[in-house]
């Protein structure tokens, strides 16, 4: 029994000696991350920079060396603090814990080296270092990062060729932006997606330089982006088309088997504007009104033709009636209105800016034919 007690005492004393040789401390750090190319005074801070703090230079260097250009940084080694910068580029890591067997100020206080990795998608990664003191926050870190990726605000205007104005239809747009460089040849394009009504802005990013020589000579990438747009609906009422710039003034629809229009553009600069063209496929039947002889109660039928020769498509009917004019009770007979109102049709093949409808009004004995442009909402008929 005494031997067991003696053995336990020895083990306890050993553990106490080993652990008792170390003191545990904590402190904080903070600072400012700015854009190296900023021309303002002070330089503009960078928001959303990931800040990783390590107590081991080896661990920090291992993570730094593992990162590959064009990929998202993910730490593998042990880091002791992480945060992201605010809108003005400032950051604070309030508590980093370390232990020391030989504290610099006795067992009650110490300082230690902290090693950083700063990462941002558009700036890449950079190393940093500082010294922190226990029981305080040392906000002395300052780092300047240089963009390795370019951001372009791409303004997309969805213009209707019939009106020259932006459409009020909601159109689904995808922008495929190349991410390759001379050293990264297998990178997949980055796809940006948006639903746009009339006009919208998509911010796209891509590698700033293709190689070290371009970087040295200030030659920035001008990517060839692929823009795909379509109406994301069960019933297509607006489709992409040519803009008529060719010698034949071609405004025909320009879509693939998915009803998509594909446009290739080379973009550059902080902002770039692209106009995407389209036109309607759905048209309202105009509202016909007027006078049909002098008889009331006559049934008028409105028929439409797809080609102007065979009128077989029913667009509704009304009866003529008397219309009271003014305040003295005078009546006008044979009047009708709203014939065709609420009816519509589709045209997926016309090649001009607008289409036209072929209509026939008939009472069974006589008829009147009209060719009406699709941008005309009402038609007046007078039949003696």
Image: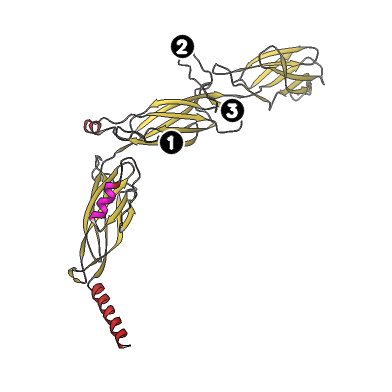
Query: In percent of the image, x 26 and y 33: which residue is there?
Result: 211
| Residue bearing the label numbered 2 | 247
Checking the image for residue 49, the label placed there is none
In this orientation, does residue 323 appear? no
Outermost residue on the bottom side: it is 2
Q: Nearer the N terminus, badge 1 or badge 2?
A: 1
The residue segment tinted magenta is: 57-65
Tag 1, which secondary structure? strand
Residue 347 % position (x, y): 61, 21
Give the percent coordinates (x, y) of residue 94.
Answer: 30, 61
* Residue with the mark numbered 3: 237
Q: Where is residue 47 in the image (x, y as percent from the top left)?
A: 33, 47
- State which mark lies toward you, 1 or 2: 1
Please tell me the numbered disc located at residue 191.
1
Taking depth in this image into account, of 6 and 340 the one nearest to the observer is 6
Q: What element carries label 2?
A: loop
Quadrant for the N terminus in the image: bottom left
- Residue 104 image point, x, y percent: 17, 67
Task: Give the SS element for disc 3.
Answer: loop
Magenta includes 60?
Answer: yes
Question: What is the crowding at mark 2: few (fewer than 14 residues within 10 Å), some, or many (at least 20)?
Answer: few
Residue 272, picture quadrant: top left
User: First in sequence: mark 3 or mark 2?
Assistant: 3
Q: In this view, does 170 lie above or below 135?
A: above
Answer whether residue 296 is magenta in the image. Answer: no
């Amino acid at each position: 029994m005494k031997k067991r007690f003696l053995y336990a005492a020895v083990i306890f004393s050993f553990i106490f000696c080993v652990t008792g040789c170390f003191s545990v401390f904590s402190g904080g750090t903070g600072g400012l991350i700015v854009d190296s190319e900023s021309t303002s005074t002070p330089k503009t801070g960078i928001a959303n920079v990931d800040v990783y703090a390590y107590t081991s230079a080896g661990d920090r260097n291992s993570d730094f060396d593992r990162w590959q250009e064009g990929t998202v940084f993910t730490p593998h080694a042990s880091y002791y603090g992480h945060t992201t910068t605010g809108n003005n580029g400032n950051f604070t890591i309030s508590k980093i814990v370390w232990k020391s067997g030989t504290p610099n100020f006795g067992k009650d206080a110490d300082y230690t080296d902290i090693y950083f990795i700063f990462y941002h998608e558009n700036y890449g990664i950079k190393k940093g270092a500082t010294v922190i003191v226990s029981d305080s926050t040392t906000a002395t870190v300052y780092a300047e990062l240089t963009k390795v990726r370019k951001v372009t605000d791409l303004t997309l205007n969805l213009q209707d060729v019939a009106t020259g104005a932006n459409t009020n239809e909601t159109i689904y747009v995808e922008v495929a932006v190349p991410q390759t460089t001379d050293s990264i040849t297998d990178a997949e394009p980055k796809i940006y997606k948006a639903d746009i009504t009339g006009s919208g802005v998509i911010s796209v990013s891509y590698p700033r330089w293709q190689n070290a020589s371009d970087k040295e000579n200030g030659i920035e990438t001008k990517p060839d982006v692929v823009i795909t747009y379509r109406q994301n609906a069960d019933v297509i009422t607006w489709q992409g088309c040519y803009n008529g710039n060719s010698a034949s003034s071609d405004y025909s629809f320009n879509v693939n088997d998915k009803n998509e229009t594909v446009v290739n553009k080379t973009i550059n600069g902080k902002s770039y504007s692209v106009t995407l063209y389209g036109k309607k496929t759905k048209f309202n039947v105009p509202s016909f009104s007027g006078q049909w002889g002098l008889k009331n109660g006559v049934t008028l039928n409105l028929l439409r033709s797809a080609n102007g020769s065979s009128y077989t498509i029913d667009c509704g009917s009304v009866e003529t009636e008397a219309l009271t004019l003014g305040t003295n009770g005078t009546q006008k007979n044979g009047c009708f209105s709203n014939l065709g109102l609420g009816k519509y049709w589709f045209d997926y093949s016309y090649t001009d800016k607008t289409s036209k409808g072929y209509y026939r009004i008939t009472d069974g004995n006589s008829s009147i034919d009209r060719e009406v442009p699709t941008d005309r909402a009402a038609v007046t008929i007078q039949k003696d």
